[in-house]
Amino acid sequence: MKKQTEKTKNTHSKIIKQFQNTPPTFKGETNNSPSMTVPDMTLTVKQLLHNHSRGIHSDVSHNEPMYFDHEIPNIDDITDLVAFRNDIKAREKALKAKIKEENDLKILEQQKLFKAEQNALKEQNEKPTATTKGENL
């Protein structure tokens, strides 16, 4: 018999066999970060269905599926596949440009609102305080 060294013992202990009775040990992980949940912000299924039937939208985003007006070409014809791939890439570029444009517009709107709020705060702070008739500044 061969003499087992520490190296061979370690490699043999990591192997899982088909009919092994004891599962391999897994230490797991611990989560020490603070919880991000907000208490009392959950809705039951009944409430969700009620809101949906009343037309009250939730904050859940719904991705709209994209349907194309042409079929996927036959795999045997390489020229059709190349044209199809180029068409899909062009559509992807157009969609990315549209998404970027929409995001830029949202950012501009938020900046305008932020500037308007800042100006309102400045005007509110710069208003002279009401003085009585006899007081001089």
Image (cartoon, helix red, strand yellow):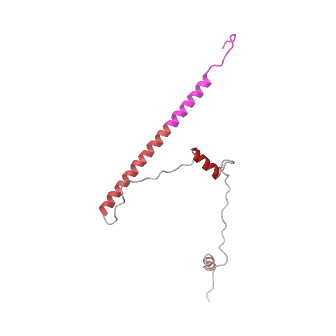
Quadrant location of the N terminus in the rendered image: bottom right
Instruction: Look at 58% across and 44% down and name the residue there.
Output: 54
Residue 111 is a magenta residue: yes
Residue furthest to the bottom:
1
Q: Position of residue 27 (x, y in %)?
A: 67, 67
Residue 80 x %, y %: 31, 60
Picture quarter containing residue 19? bottom right
The span shown in magenta is: 109-137
The quarter of the picture where the C terminus appears is top right
Q: In this view, does 131 lie above or below 120?
A: above
Residue 58 in view: no
From what the image shows, is residue 112 above or below residue 101?
Answer: above
Q: Residue 100 appears in which quarter of the rendering? A: top left
Q: Where is residue 62 in the image (x, y as percent from the top left)?
A: 52, 50
Nearer to the camera, 90 or 2: 90
Residue 39's x, y, as percent?
69, 48
Q: How many labels does the image show?
A: 0
Instruction: Decide whether the magenta segment is chiefly helix, strand or loop.
Output: helix
Q: Which residue is drawn at 41% across and 46% down?
A: 97
Residue 87 shown left or right of residue 16 in the figure? left
Q: Nearer the viewer, residue 31 or 55?
A: 55
* Residue 89 appears left or right of 130: left
**Can I make out residue 92 in this image?**
yes
- Does 134 sit left or right of 120 as displayed? right
